[in-house]
Amino acid sequence: KNYGNIAEDIFGGDASKVVFGFCISACSGTGSNVDGAEAAEVMTKLRAAHLDNGGAFLWVANDDGPDASWSSAVYPAIFDDSSQKSRSTTTTTPAGSSTSASTTSSTDPQPPPAVQPKGTPGTSGCRHPVTAICGPNTPCSNTENGQIMCC
């Protein structure tokens, strides 16, 4: 309900402008950490209510880890195209009778391949994947032992 109210009251009903944020492990103090399965369930329910939602983000992307276990569980819930996998259409023939046709595609949604955009810092020596594009408005600020890491 709150998501819909935000979309309606602030963005004139455009739910694609509202992004849902999650904490994997950095929000212990508030008790609001969620694992991948819990986040996937939230996004599945959100998608059912707001198909055009703005997606999800992590507060601390490095908590996803090198195996991306959290985002691997959540990605299909955000980009579930099961409504596109099996489509039924009804057409009317000249005689006035209806016929139905179904098409099925078995293509499962897959995360896009990781690509290092031009102008991002090198990732050699980084233990974590690139999580953002660096630039004048998004400086590299993640540090480990005082050294700049991957964004």
Image: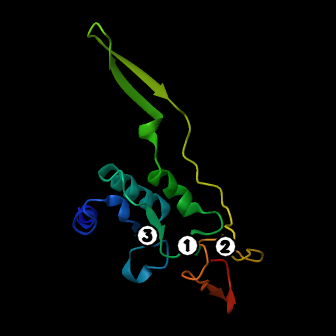
**Total tally of numbered discs in the picture:** 3
- Image coordinates of residue 137 in percent, x first then y, are 54, 82
User: x, y (%) of residue 27?
Assistant: 44, 79
Residue 102 in percent (x, y) is at 43, 23
Amino acid of disc 2: His
As displayed, is residue 63 above or below residue 36?
Answer: below
Give the class, few, some or many, for how many residues have Cα within 10 Å of label 2's Cα (few <14, many ≥20).
Answer: some
Of pointers 3 and 2, the one earlier in the residue sequence: 3
Q: Amino acid at mark 3?
A: Phe
- What residue is shown with label 3? 22
- Pick whichever, 75 or 88, lies toward us: 88
Give residue 122's quadrant in the image.
Answer: bottom right
Query: Does dot 3 land on a helix, a strand or a loop?
Result: strand
Instruction: Judge by depth and name the residue closer to the eye, 97 or 25.
Output: 97
Residue 128, disc: 2
Which circle's residue, 3 or 1, is located before the other in the chain? 3
* Side of 141 where 91 appears, left or right: left
